[in-house]
Image: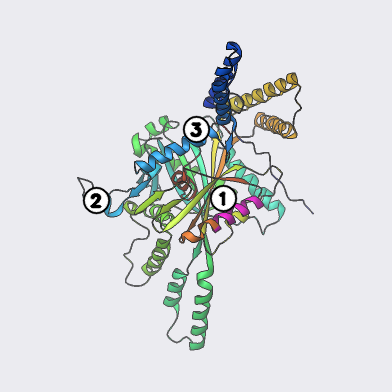
């Protein structure tokens, strides 16, 4: 019998200014050392009463940890949040409060926080339809979102599991090139309760007049009992194109937004075969109204039932002219408020976590399944964000990491310190990564963001505890995104490809 394949070797980025210290942390350690030497040089006990407590305070700020962050980073984060609260920048009002455009009189698409700069463009998909393109004018990116289905891994044999994982790895590796125009790939999945409104509407329209009364009664009881307890899963694939990387192709396609959209459509058509090889079936590349529908239902879970019922009604005779989806101008929430540890949007409350540490041991391909287990009281969403790294940058990054680890190991040997098993393992993983890169494998930066959403604030902490327990069962270390819940929601609950900063600092 074939043994299931296992996977591991994930390595966290550590990009401190000196060792594991950030730039401000290193400056505080240097200042603490200077303050501690002042009383010695002056031979003054009075100066020691001032300098020694100052040095201890600086060391505590630089080396102390508060929920995974250094003390100085935590204080800076808290100060920024309090300033945001004092200036009411953590509040967002749209709907009737949104200003109307002077030329058209319409209320423009209004999204909160980091999403305020986004625009949903309407572009031809090359097949006679429309494609919704998410344009970020600040970052210079264009993103397309596809609704996909996949056969899954839990119920197939080990050979098929390994083949599908290898095909997905080959898909990511194909974009680890110097000339790749795609800067980010995101896989988003959400698990949400389904009240059965769409199913009930479809059943009511298909029951014939001569159906037996007992059968209709039994079916109605079944629908009433089982329909609201079902759960629906939605999976989206988002590809993000960088206009700066593809500037020559964009210029050749006409330049501007039209040229960028044309290049993005070419990339989408080119990846169809690779996606099908990986077992992913693209149901559709979302047009603007479907994309707005997806964003809206993330902000307002109650709108999911209304829009599903309207979509089912649109199939009935007399409603053929009803357009599916939602106008992009109505994609955002009516109101939102970002608190220190939660995010309130319309009639829901959300908490977002970032995966800080992946499993240290080797795991199976189905390791993440518990994270999206259906919950009756909450909806969950998870975004896996991938950033392919070109060969030149990958070689530089891995060489820099090896040099840091070698210098740290040499320093430990000079000072007589023993090397821990964690340090030995990290060095072995770094060497394995460099060997794999040299043999033609790709290097990908990856992170995951998890969001749990409830409509009853009394159930929020219970839902958070359940999510943390399931993450622990998967071997993941998750951290609540304190002071940045609105940004975390944009990355974890929306399939817009947000996330992954250019470079993380600290660890």
Work out whether residue 13 can be spotted: yes
Give the magenta part as a residue range.
462-473
Residue sitting at 59 percent across and 38 percent down?
173
Residue 294 position by quadrant: bottom left
Could you tell me which secondary element the residue under label 3 belongs to?
loop
- SS for callout 2: loop
Q: Left or right: where does residue 150 sit relative to residue 293?
A: right
Q: Residue at x 53, y 67 (%)?
A: 230
For the C terminus, the quadrant is top right
- The circle drawn on residue 304 is none
Residue most extreme to the right: 1
Query: Could you tell whether 258 is left or right of 165 in the image?
Result: left
Front residue of 83 and 403: 83
Q: What distance separates the C-alpha of mark 1 from that of mark 3?
A: 30 Å
Q: Label 2, label 1: how many angstroms apart (C-alpha)?
A: 41 Å
Q: Label 3, on which residue?
A: 502
Density class for disc 1 (Cα within 10 Å; few <14, some 14-19, many ≥20) is some
Picture layout, residue 160 above or below residue 244? below
Q: Of the residues under marks 2 and 1, which one precedes in the sequence? A: 2
Residue 176 versus residue 395: which sits nearer the camera? Answer: 395
Q: Position of residue 260 (x, y in %)?
A: 39, 37
Task: Tell me whether circle 1 and circle 3 mark residues in contact (CB < 8 Å).
Answer: no
Q: Position of residue 406 (x, y in %)?
A: 69, 23
Find disc 2 in the rendering and name its residue: 106
In magenta stretch: residue 264:
no
Mark 3 vs mark 2: which is more N-terminal? 2
């Amino acid at each position: 019998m074939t043994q299931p394949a296992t996977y591991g070797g994930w390595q966290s980025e550590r990009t401190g200014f000196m060792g594991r210290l950030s730039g401000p942390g290193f400056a505080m350690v240097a200042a603490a050392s200077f303050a501690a030497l002042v009383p010695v040089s002056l031979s003054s006990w009075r100066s020691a009463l001032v300098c020694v407590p100052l040095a201890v305070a600086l060391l505590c700020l630089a080396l102390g940890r508060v929920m995974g962050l250094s003390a100085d980073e935590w204080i800076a984060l808290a100060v920024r949040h309090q300033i945001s609260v004092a200036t009411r920048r953590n509040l967002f009002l749209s709907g009737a409060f949104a200003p109307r455009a002077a030329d058209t009189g319409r209320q423009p698409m209004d999204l909160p926080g980091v999403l305020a700069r986004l625009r949903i463009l309407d572009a031809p998909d090359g097949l006679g339809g429309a494609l919704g393109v998410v344009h970020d004018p600040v970052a210079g990116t264009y993103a397309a979102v596809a609704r996909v289905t996949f056969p899954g891994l839990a119920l197939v044999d080990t050979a098929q599991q390994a083949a599908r994982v290898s095909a997905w790895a080959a898909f990511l590796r194909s974009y680890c090139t110097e000339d790749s125009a795609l800067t980010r790939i995101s896989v988003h999945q959400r698990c949400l309760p389904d009240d059965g409104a769409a199913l009930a509407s479809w059943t009511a329209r298909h029951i014939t007049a001569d159906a037996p009364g007992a059968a209709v009664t039994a079916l109605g009881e079944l629908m009433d009992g089982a329909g609201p307890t079902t759960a629906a899963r939605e999976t989206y694939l988002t590809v993000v194109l960088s206009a700066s990387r593809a500037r020559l192709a964009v210029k050749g396609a006409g330049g501007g937004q039209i040229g960028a959209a044309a290049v993005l459509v070419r990339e989408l058509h080119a990846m169809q075969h690779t996606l099908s090889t990986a077992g992913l079936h693209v149901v559709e590349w979302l047009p603007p109204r479907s994309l707005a529908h997806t964003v809206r239902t993330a902000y307002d879970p109650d709108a999911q039932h209304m829009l599903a019922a309207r979509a089912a009604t649109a199939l009935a005779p007399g409603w053929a002219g009803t357009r599916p989806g939602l106008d992009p101008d109505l994609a955002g929430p009516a109101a939102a408020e970002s608190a220190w540890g939660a995010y309130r949007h319309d009639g829901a409350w959300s908490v977002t976590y970032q995966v800080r540490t992946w499993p240290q041991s080797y795991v199976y391909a189905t390791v993440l399944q518990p994270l999206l287990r259906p919950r009756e009281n909450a909806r969950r969403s998870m975004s896996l964000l991938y950033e392919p790294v070109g060969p030149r940058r990958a070689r530089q990054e891995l060489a820099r990491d090896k040099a840091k680890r070698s210098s740290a190991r040499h320093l430990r040997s000079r000072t007589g310190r023993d090397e821990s098993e964690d340090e030995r393992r990290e060095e072995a993983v770094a060497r394995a990564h460099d060997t794999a890169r040299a043999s033609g494998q790709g290097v990908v930066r990856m992170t995951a963001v998890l969001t749990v959403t409830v409509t009853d604030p009394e159930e929020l902490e219970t839902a958070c505890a359940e999510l943390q327990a399931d993450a622990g069962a998967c071997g993941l270390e998750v951290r609540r995104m304190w002071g940045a819940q609105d940004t975390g929601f944009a990355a974890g609950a929306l399939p817009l490809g947000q996330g992954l900063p250019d470079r993380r600092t600290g660890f």
